[in-house]
Image (spheres, rainbow, N blue to C red):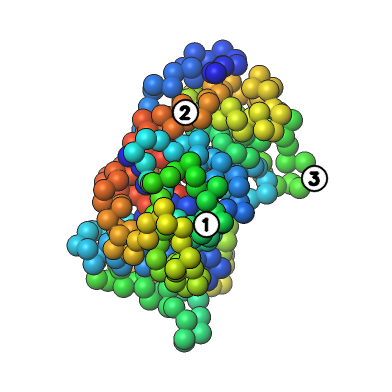
């Protein structure tokens, strides 16, 4: 089980494509920094392949004015939730 | 779909997890990502760790033949790639989709590599205890 | 922890520091931060951000002071980008230096060791 961190907006299609290749059963995706923009309903296509296994970091949403605009299928986690995810998953990789 | 070019039989084995998998997603010259990722691979190998490389996205351009420092006089990464064998880095994997999207036949590359479809890339990452993406 | 992101240019450096503080607060030990790529700039002793901005250098040093976290800077990536300690400045005939303890210039081998010795590695990129 791998935690994938992604910090790019869906505009960076290549990184989402490469992540889709590498994303396995039981893996989880955490959107951070500009990755937050993929948590809007407009980013639904970019993260569709990870449905039900996507979280987004709350503090990065808030600073960008995105809180309250997050697609219902995506879980919002705070920094404690981020730490939880790294405890649950044995390893993490970062896509950028 | 899985094809191997060249002669190294070791590269056909996907079920050969190494100590460390380095994923290379960036093209040479435009940034230092590729060079710095390969540096980690070579140092880890020099320390006796078994290292595998996965070329994904624009990272597949690292494998083009005919690279040189040329007029840039900027060190390329092809000399590092040429050293892999000397460091016993023999497991070279490449994204089949990344090659196809860029019109690169697997047998046109500078090193023998194993091309992997998406599901096998996920398995490859799963089987490695440590992965770094550059 | 592996930090590729430059301070103040990319959020990654700040994200890394905030995450580092959160894991330490949770009671985990953060043994090593390894600065690589443009992340080496986090080790500059010459950073002088405006008072009302996040003081990243203070944050990194606090991790070392309070938790013993090693702050390791890739020497190859650092030298190319002007990150030199007193020893390297002397060796290369430079008349000033930019890296001071608790930051330490070291080789990539230390990253490999840290990765294999610790049970988690997290990377913050630009």
Residue wearing tag 3: B71
Secondary element under disc 1, as helix, strand or loop, is helix
Q: How many marks?
A: 3
Secondary element under disc 2, as helix, strand or loop, is helix
Residue C104 x, y percent position in the rendering: 39, 61
Which dot marks residue A41? Answer: 1
Which dot marks residue B119? Answer: 2
Check contact, mark 2 vs mark 3: CB within 8 A: no
Instruction: Name the residue furthest left.
Output: C27
What residue appears at the point 42 percent right and 73 percent down from the top-left corner? C57
Residue C7 x, y percent position in the rendering: 50, 68
User: Observer-nearest residue: A66 or B16?
Assistant: A66
Disc 3 and disc 1: Cα gap in Å? 47 Å
Disc 2 and disc 1: Cα gap in Å? 27 Å
Q: Is residue A81 left or right of residue C82?
A: left
To which chain does the residue with label 2 belong?
B
Residue B25 x, y percent position in the rendering: 57, 41
User: Observer-nearest residue: A11 or C45?
Assistant: A11
What residue appears at the point 58 percent right and 21 percent down from the top-left corner? B112
What residue appears at the point 26 percent right and 48 percent down from the top-left corner? A88
Residue A61 quadrant? bottom left
Can residue B49 be seen here? The reply is: no
Q: Is residue C67 left or right of residue B124?
A: left
To the question of a shared chain for discs 2 and 3, the answer is yes
User: Observer-nearest residue: B95 or C9?
Assistant: B95
């Amino acid at each position: 089980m791998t935690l994938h961190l992604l910090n790019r907006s869906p505009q960076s299609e290549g990184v989402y494509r490469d992540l889709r290749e590498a994303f396995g059963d039981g893996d989880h995706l955490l959107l951070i920094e500009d990755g937050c923009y993929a948590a809007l309903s407009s980013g639904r296509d970019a993260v569709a392949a990870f449905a039900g296994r996507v979280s987004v970091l709350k503090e990065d949403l808030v600073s960008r004015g995105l809180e309250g605009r997050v697609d219902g299928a995506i879980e919002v986690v705070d920094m404690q939730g981020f730490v939880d995810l790294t405890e649950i998953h044995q390893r993490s990789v970062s896509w950028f | 779909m899985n094809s191997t070019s060249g002669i190294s039989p070791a590269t056909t084995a996907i079920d050969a997890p190494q100590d460390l998998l380095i994923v290379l997603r960036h093209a040479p010259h435009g940034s230092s990502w590729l060079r710095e990722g390969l540096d980690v691979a070579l140092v880890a190998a020099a320390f006796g760790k078994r290292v595998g490389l996965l070329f994904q996205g624009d990272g597949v351009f690292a494998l083009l033949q005919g690279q040189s420092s040329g007029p840039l006089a900027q060190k390329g990464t092809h000399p590092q790639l040429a050293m892999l064998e000397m460091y016993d880095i023999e497991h070279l994997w490449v994204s089949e989709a990344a090659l196809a999207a860029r019109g690169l036949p697997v047998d046109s590359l500078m090193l023998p590599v194993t091309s992997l479809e998406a599901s096998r890339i996920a398995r490859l990452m799963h089987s490695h205890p440590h992965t770094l993406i550059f | 922890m592996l930090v590729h992101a430059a301070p103040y240019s990319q959020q990654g450096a700040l994200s890394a520091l905030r995450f580092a503080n959160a894991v330490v607060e949770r009671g985990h030990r953060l043994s090593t931060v390894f600065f690589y790529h443009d992340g080496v700039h986090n080790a500059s002793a010459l950073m002088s951000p405006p008072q009302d901005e996040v003081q990243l250098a203070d944050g990194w040093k606090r991790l070392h002071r309070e938790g013993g976290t090693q702050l390791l800077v890739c020497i190859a990536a650092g030298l190319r980008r002007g990150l030199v300690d007193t020893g390297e400045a002397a060796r290369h005939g430079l008349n000033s230096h930019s890296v001071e303890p608790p930051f330490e210039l070291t080789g990539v081998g230390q990253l490999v060791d840290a990765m294999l010795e610790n049970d988690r590695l997290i990377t913050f990129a630009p």
